[in-house]
Amino acid sequence: MITVRFPAMLHARAGQELTLDESPSDIGSLLDALDAHVPGLARELADPIYNFAVNDEMLLHGVRNHPLESGDVVEIVPTISGGSHSFPRHSFPALFDFRNCRFNRISR
Amino acid sequence: MAIRDRVERLLNEMPREPQYASQGSTVFIDLERSETRRAYTPLKVTRALIGGRGANMYYLFRLLDETKTPLDPGIPLIFGSGPLTGLVPSAARGNCTSWSPDSGVLMDCNAGDYFPSFIRMNGIDHLVIYGRAPAWTLLVIHEGRFEFRDARPYVGLDNIDMRLSIERDLGGVWARNMSMVNITRAGENLVLTSGIMAGPKAIYARGGPGAKMGSLRLKAIVTLSAIHEFPTPEPYKPYNRHIAGKLLGTSVVKAALSTTGTPFLYRPSRLLGAMGAKNNQETTWTERLDASNIDPYRPGMEGCFRCPVNCRPLNDLHTLPSDKYGRGDGPEYVTLGKFGPNLGIDTVEPVIRLNNICNDLGFDTASMGSSIAWAFELFQRGIITKAHTGGLELQWGDAALVEQLLFMTATREGFGNVLADSARAVEKGHYPAEALKYRMAVKGLWQSDPHDARILKAFALGLAVATRGMDHLRNRVTLEINAKINDDPAFKERLYGGPVSAEPNGYAGKEQAVRACENIFAVGDAVGMCRFTTKLFNSPSLPGMEEFQKQLANVTGLQFTLEELDRAGLNITGVERMINHRLGVRRKDDTLPDRWFDEPNTAGPFKGERIDRDEFDRMLSRFYDISQLTDEGVPREPWKTELMEMVGT
């Protein structure tokens, strides 16, 4: 089980928090799973304004392949560094097919 | 040579007519004699240093007498706006330059709000002020004409009351036809952490400019003029729409700067374990200071002249209207960090209140918060005792005590006199030499922001080499904190003009990133652009050299290649280093506080991280090499000779 927390700017689209019953193996898989649940979310999260923290620790590089374990809490953390319509989107392509995840929405 | 002789010699070399369309004059103001003289920045200086901060360096280099001391009336205080200031969206900035009474090296600070734009509405690009006025003086600039008024009725007023009094007495309207820079009691009392206020919160902050202005007995400069259009060689407004679109279309502006402002940065910094707490003894702090906790106290956002971003959060603590400090502007991330974790305060309400007090008392919150945090740690360690503090028990988290200390500092009362001497407290004999081990300063200037840079080596190098001292706004490679950019090496290489390690705590190539940031930030200051909205600071996609190039051509008629603009950025920092060299700065001063080399980071994914001295030294050497600097950190030949000829020596 992975818990995902969203920043206020994404609450309207994704809610405050999602709990994923099955555990994706890394952040890349998690993104694909999120996109399956909230279509277009992975593309939105490709904006460099969004960083990721796992269990209250920020990730600064090697994000896609960062391993996840059941019980991890992943937080989307906006930073004032990055972000644009012109930034190349290829840095977060969908790599994993993760169709079997189920989400329990806690709040929206 | 006396300052008047230096000014005379300089004036003899300067043109008496504008050198390009829309150029404003440089006004030399002799406060002692109540005299003004005008000329224009030479074109060769504009081509090499552009204007604003860049041209300020030309004036300081020529007028500086390093045999004097910073508060001597023969050391000028210089204000400068850029060629785009007041004309281009988000270009509302200007610089204030001198020899810092706080750090002892270059003083150069930047502010926005309305004053930098409104002096341009008066046909002025630079003010060069020297001489001590016989009595406290109010300088009024009305449609380009100067009037020296008696400021004695205003002496003793802090920022809130000063602004009310001037509005009442001069009849202008803030932000419509009137602007002001002014000092408070702190500046009058030569407090080294005092700034020059440029609005309710805007401040020329770093290096003690308030003390410098106070030493000249200049209480305030007020501009009165209508807002008008400038004659330009080419229309610039159509391209302004492109720039505004770029500003407002960038997600960092839409999602963060325009809605919450810089306090947004607090959460990522503490999750990284890079939030300086208790004078950087610890590196993370409570979630109770996350920006979301300020939301209930933020009634809206404000902005500078013609800036569509509006990044300045207002605050309202919902106290009685009679509570002078129950509402105001801010806090910014710097103040949140310096008066929150850095002082052990863990709730937002006292931080907001202390922010409002600092805005009124005219303090640089970075230096003031650091000066207090240093004292707290010295007390914690027993290096100072109640015998030093006048009986005060300095305890982390005691917000009421901090409030008391702020007012004591403004008037140099009791232990406030020690805090007022800022980073110089050892030199002034207040603290034993052992205290320097815990002083979080470089080149005598306190660190500007609360980010603990033991992890991010580009941040660390930038803080070490910044020409005004330990300051992130000169060259911070902010995008180092961005995982997606770190994970895209090709894009990162394009951004910085060379390969830069993807690892935030790696040393490889970080000099390249700092060099690129120094150049573009210096050019941004020289044209008048805000740092927050300059490419590479908060985003890779905000306006940068291309936009500056285009609007400089439209507004001035001067054509710069992108290479020439980049070279101008290098030139500006080169002249700054030549000034610092005259003031005794050498390679040994391009360093960091011992704590970051010797003590490990205490929290987060990089727990245990510190700066390796040998790696740092090699990174510094590489930075000098690509910056065309000698081993002692000054421009190499033939560049040095080119710069000397350009400034006319």
Image (cartoon, rainbow, N blue to C red):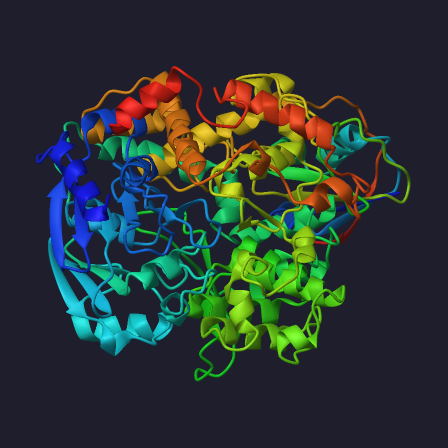
Give the image quarter of residue B5.
Answer: top left
Q: Position of residue B138 (x, y in %)?
A: 21, 66
Q: Is residue B339 visible?
A: yes
Q: Residue at x 41, y 61 (%)?
A: B201
Q: Position of residue B178 (x, y in %)?
A: 22, 61
Q: Is residue B31 above or below residue B351?
A: above
Q: Is residue B491 above or below residue A13?
A: above
Out of A72 and B1, give the one closest to the viewer.
B1
Q: Is residue B200 above or below residue B128?
A: below
Q: Quarter holding the N terminus of chain B?
A: top left
Q: Position of residue B246 (x, y in %)?
A: 40, 34
Q: Position of residue B601 (x, y in %)?
A: 77, 45
Q: Is residue A86 visible?
A: no
Q: Residue at x 80, y 40 (%)?
A: B605
Q: Quarter holding the C terminus of chain B?
A: top left
Q: How many marks do you count on the picture?
A: 0
**Would residue B582 be found to the left or right of residue B337 on screen?**
left
Give the image quarter of residue B179.
Answer: bottom left
Q: Residue at x 37, y 38 (%)?
A: B525
Give the image quarter of residue B208.
Answer: bottom left
Out of B39 and B168, give the one closest to the viewer.
B39
